[in-house]
Amino acid sequence: PEEWFRTKTRTGGTKQLNISRIISLQPDLILANKEENVKEQVDELAASFPVWVSDISNLADALTMIRELGRITGREARGMEIAGQINAQFDALPRQQPPRNAAYLIWKEPFMCAGGDTFIHSMLEAAGFSNVFAHKERYPEVSAAEIAASGAEWLLLSSEPFPFAAKHLGTMQSLFPGIRSVLVDGEMFSWYGSRLLHAPAYFRQLQEELAR
């Protein structure tokens, strides 16, 4: 919420936690994530406070997380409701047949993509894409030559963590004349909390745009 964003105490970024400030707040619960947070910092905090660590690789993991957070925060019914709504919306998504071959780029100079063991990969499949770099792990660097030879029909240029924008479309077209590029909302492909309530509608709209 905007009010919280402007008024709550800041405790650092995902990789640079202000440990002393967190300790001063005496939290009843700390939520951490295996991919985003540094293990040593989480271990230090876990010595004094309850810490719940998520490890999300796919939609099923995300739904389990939402239900579990609802349970441990005394909002079990709400957690079940949100997870149920998300699951129903994803089940109702039309299946793209055949899936469109795509590379999902998260960085430029060097190019980095989403591999097959990521939450983004899971969302690509749900959105009707086949990840041409599914055989790679995590977020590997890939060369321009690898992208050109990947068999990708589309390059999905994410808005985060690298802020791909309209100015990059021309560059990509020059580098990869046989592959079409499109800007995509990184939040819809990589945010695995309640933002997933909005992802299926976005994926449906994206597929309609690509079909034009």
Image (cartoon, rainbow, N blue to C red):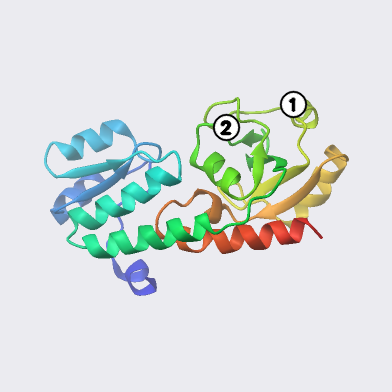
Query: Is any atom of residue 12 visible in this view?
Result: no
Instruction: Using the image, tell me which numbered label, if any, was put on residue 11.
Output: none
Determine the residue located farthest toward the bottom in the rendered image: 3
Crowding around mark 1 (Cα neighbors within 10 Å: few <14, some 14 to 19, many 20+) is few
Q: Which mark is residue 115?
A: 2
Q: Tell me: 64 left or right of 201.
A: left
- Which residue type does callout 1 highlight? Glu
| In the foreground, 10 or 205 | 205
Q: Which amino acid type corresponds to the residue marked 2 in the rendered image?
A: Gly
Q: Quick check: marks 2 and 1 in contact, CB under 8 Å?
A: no
Q: In which quarter of the image is the C terminus?
A: bottom right
Residue wearing tag 1:
146
Q: State whether residue 26 is above or below residue 99.
A: below
Q: Is residue 17 left or right of residue 89?
A: left
> Picture quarter containing residue 114?
top right
Residue 6 pos. (x, y %):
36, 70
User: N-terminal of the two: label 2 or label 1?
Assistant: 2
Task: State left or right for residue 135 relative to residue 183.
Answer: left
Query: Residue 200's spot in the image, x, y percent?
Result: 55, 59
Q: Position of residue 165 (x, y in %)?
A: 70, 55
Residue at point 64% right, 60% down? 204
